[in-house]
Structure formats: C-alpha cells, structure tokens
Amino acid sequence: MFGEKVIQFYRNMQTGFALPPGVEVMQPFSRPASAVVTETFYRRFYGDENPRTFIIGINPGRFGGGVTGIPFTDPVKLERYCGIANDFPKKTELSADFIYRVIESFGGAEAFYSKFYFTSISPLGFTREGVNMNYYDDPVLVKVLDDFMIRSMETQVDFGTNQLNCICLGSGKNLKQLQRLNERGHFFRNINVLDHPRFIMQYKRKSLDEYLLRYLSVLAQVQ
C-alpha cells in the first residue's frame, strides 16, 4: 500500500547530520503523538496502490508539518478537514490555510489525496535559534543534505508516482534546487511550478481567488 510505504519512510528516516552551528533539526514523526496521527492519516487517505502526482515543497514548518508530521497540515486542518482528532495546540499555519482552500475547492481531502502526495525537497525541517528556516538558507546545510535529499526522493518515487509530471511549490530557490536534484536523479520528466502558498498568503492575499484558480488549473492538467 502507498500509505504503508510512506509510514516506513518516515519511521526509518536517519538523521545524525553534522549541522551548521545553531541549526537544529525538526523530526516530528519521531515523537509518539505525531507518529500516531501521521500513521492514521496515511492509512486513511493512502490505503491503496494508486499512483500519485507529487507536489513538492521546501521543508516542514514549525506550525504545520513540523507539528503533525504531515506536509501543509496544521493541527486545526488535520481535525477539521481530515477528521483526525489530536491534542496538539490548535495553531494554524499560513501555508496550510491556503492549501486547504485548494483541497476543499478540489472536492475535499479524500478526493485530493487520492490523486496527489505532498512532500518536500527536505522531509526534515530546521530551526535556527528557535526560528523556522528553509534548508536553502544556509549553503553549508544544502551540501550536508545533498545526498540525503536525493535518497529521500528516490525512495518516495518508488511508492508509486506519476513520473511524467510533478509540481514544485516555489518559483525561486526551491525550484532551482529541485531542478538540480532532478538532473541527478531523473525523477520527473516535467516540473510544473506554482507560487509557494506562504508567499501567496503573505504578499498576495488580495489575489487569493486568482491563485486558487491557478492551482486548480495546474492540478487538473497534471493528474
């Protein structure tokens, strides 16, 4: 089953990197409470052998995937839209706010997750002095993670994926990194690009409906 492969991927993830000074890793699925909801989620929505189109973000954030272990899903969305009760503090995340607008417009969590799989170039999140950071913010960190990111994508592609198309969230540094890794690993034939949801919510909030339609258009083209 697709979902069981995802669970094993998270369970078996190895850390132990020589991180740059001040950088700490977030590995939410190593915490029992996060592991429970992660396994519940993937068994509920990915309990089949259907291939998915990958939607690839940056890395987990402190208030979404960094808490629940599920990309772009904060504790509020996990309960409200996925039907999975949890005891996490009910904080929301900007990226998750937009993503679940998309998911609801697509037909809801069951319809969406039957066709798409969220992951990140780095499935581990990072903080520096308690503040969320992106893996590409530190060139030393990128070098440290390089082989890990390649191996992680290789493993996930074997879950069952649409290798004709993927979607990259972020048209700047994240896209450049994905293109670089894809040249090495030949994971996807076409990389489709959408603006990152946090960018949309932070800087383009007045145009949310336009971005929502753009997302839905691309999702319809690549599935």
Image (tube, rainbow, N blue to C red):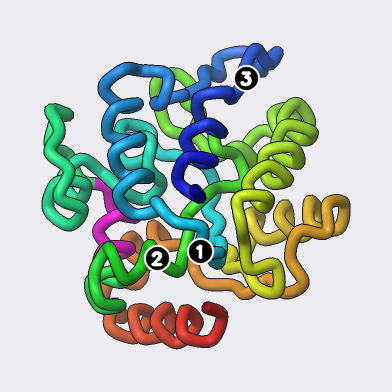
Which of the two labelled residues, at mark 1 and mark 3, occupies the earlier sequence position? 3
Three-letter amino acid code at the position of disc 1: Asn
Residue segment shown in magenta: 93-100
Q: Amino acid at mark 3?
A: Gln
Q: Amino acid at mark 2?
A: Ser
Label 2 sits on residue: 114
Query: Is 47 positioned to the left or the right of 170 in the image?
Result: left
Location of residue 25 in the rendering, given as x and y in whole percent from the top left corner: 52, 21
207 up-or-down from 39: above or below: below
Residue 193 % position (x, y): 59, 72
- Is residue 71 positioned above or below 174 on the image? above
| Residue topped by disc 3 | 14
Who's the residue at 52% across and 78% down the image? 223
N-terminal of the pair, mark 2 or mark 1, is 1
Label 1 crowd (10 A; few <14 / some 14-19 / many >=20): some
Of helix, strand and loop, which one carries label 1? loop
Mark 2, residues whose alpha carbon is within 10 Å: few (<14), some, or many (≥20)?
Answer: some
